[in-house]
């Protein structure tokens, strides 16, 4: 049995819906089996919903986290009961549970209309500050669970900041290319957690009064931990070459759980000058990387670490 399958594009240059694919299945395959095998849920984050539409009728909501939620009774596909077109519609930023409830209540499977309705409902919820806070905390918790799969120490640190009562400035995603973002306000500083294309990045920090933030304002939190450690006599060492690679490879984020909160508190006590000296060395390193070949990188890293230690030493 042959049918046509299409899906929405998920990024620039990905015009999948303009390139239908002919697929074949064995007679007797159930609808749920077909969706479990063919749905594109693995392309994006685990909570991003895909709406499965068979010949114009919504038949399921599919996500990587929850699997396939059928909107119709399961049935076997045969030559007498088949489909001609199966279309997967991508709805980033929409809660799959809300989407399922809307479709089950009879909403038309129109992606743009459903996304607009969701945004309006979300905005209405925002009229209650308490409800908005609870919703943000729940959303942040899901992002932290996703982060924990690759960076458990970073996820635990994010939990610590929220347990201390620090407010959430921003939480979003996953959206196109699996992009998600979580920013937590900690006094005069903001700690950011970010991921995209299936890669969870290291925790970063910046001064919250930056009026026009650039990549210079947002730096790896381990640089701040080094500054705090030397100022307080802690033997923490920043000596992993991995800390100078991009994209960051999954590995233990040493020091975050033990020293992260102390470092942020230390920065809020007015110790920005020491941190700024360490960051200045880091920026020199980034500039030098563009001027040197790969063969010279190891020596450059060693020199940078030495200069950072000197910059963080109390004066």
Image (cartoon, grey):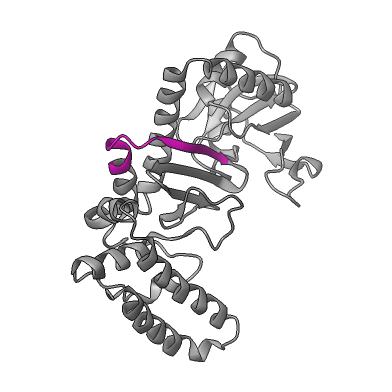
Relative to residue 182, is residue 119 depicted above or below?
above
- Given the current orientation, which residue lies at the most extreme top position? 105
- Which quarter of the image is occupied by the N terminus? top right
Relative to residue 25, is residue 148 depicted above or below?
below
Q: Position of residue 114 (x, y in %)?
A: 67, 21
- Which quarter of the image is occupied by the C terminus? bottom left
Classify residue 278 as left or right of residue 117: left
Give the quarter of the image for residue 289.
bottom right
Give the quarter of the image for residue 151.
bottom left
Q: Residue at x 36, y 49 (%)?
A: 149
Q: Residue at x 41, y 42 (%)?
A: 185
Classify residue 38 as left or right of residue 57: left
Total marks shown come to 0
Q: Position of residue 124 (x, y in %)?
A: 57, 15
Q: Nearer the viewer, residue 78 or 223?
A: 223
Note whether residue 21 is visible. Answer: yes
Q: Is residue 173 magenta?
A: yes
Relative to residue 3, is residue 265 depicted above or below?
below
Q: Is residue 268 magenta?
A: no
Classify residue 54 as left or right of residue 172: right
Classify residue 207 as left or right of residue 21: left
Q: Position of residue 254 (x, y in %)?
A: 28, 63
Q: Nearer the viewer, residue 96 or 202?
A: 202
Q: Residue at x 48, y 86 (%)?
A: 297
Q: Position of residue 250 (x, y in %)?
A: 39, 61
Where does the magenta region start and end? Answer: 160-174
Note whether residue 73 is visible. Answer: no
Q: Nearer the viewer, residue 98 or 274?
A: 274
């Amino acid at each position: 049995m042959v049918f046509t399958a299409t899906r929405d594009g998920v990024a620039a240059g990905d015009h999948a819906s303009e390139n239908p694919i002919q697929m074949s299945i064995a007679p007797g395959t159930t609808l749920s089996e077909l969706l479990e095998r063919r749905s594109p849920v693995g392309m994006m984050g685990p909570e991003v919903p895909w709406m499965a539409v068979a010949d114009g009728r919504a038949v399921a909501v599919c996500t990587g986290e929850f699997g396939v939620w059928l909107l119709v009774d399961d049935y076997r596909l045969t030559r007498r009961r088949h489909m001609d077109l199966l279309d997967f519609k991508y709805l980033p930023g929409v809660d799959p549970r809300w989407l399922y409830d809307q479709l089950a209540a009879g909403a038309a499977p129109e992606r743009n209309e459903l996304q607009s309705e969701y945004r309006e409902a979300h905005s209405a919820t925002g009229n209650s500050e308490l409800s908005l806070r609870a919703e943000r905390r729940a959303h942040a918790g899901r992002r932290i669970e996703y982060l924990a799969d690759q960076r458990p120490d970073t996820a635990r640190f994010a939990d610590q900041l929220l347990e201390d009562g620090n407010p959430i400035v921003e939480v979003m995603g996953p959206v196109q290319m699996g992009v998600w973002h979580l920013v937590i306000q900690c006094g005069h500083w903001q700690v950011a957690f970010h991921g995209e294309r299936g890669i969870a990045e290291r925790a970063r920090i910046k001064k919250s009064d930056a009026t026009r933030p650039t990549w210079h304002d947002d730096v790896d939190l381990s640089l701040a931990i080094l500054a705090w450690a030397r100022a307080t006599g802690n033997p923490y060492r920043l000596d992993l070459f991995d800390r100078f690679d991009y994209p960051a490879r999954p590995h233990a984020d040493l020091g975050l759980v033990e020293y992260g909160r102390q470092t942020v508190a230390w920065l809020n006590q007015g110790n920005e000058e020491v941190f700024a000296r360490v960051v200045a060395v880091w920026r020199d390193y980034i500039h030098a990387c563009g001027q040197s070949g790969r063969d010279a990188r190891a020596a450059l890293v060693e020199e940078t670490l030495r200069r950072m230690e000197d910059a963080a030493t109390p004066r």
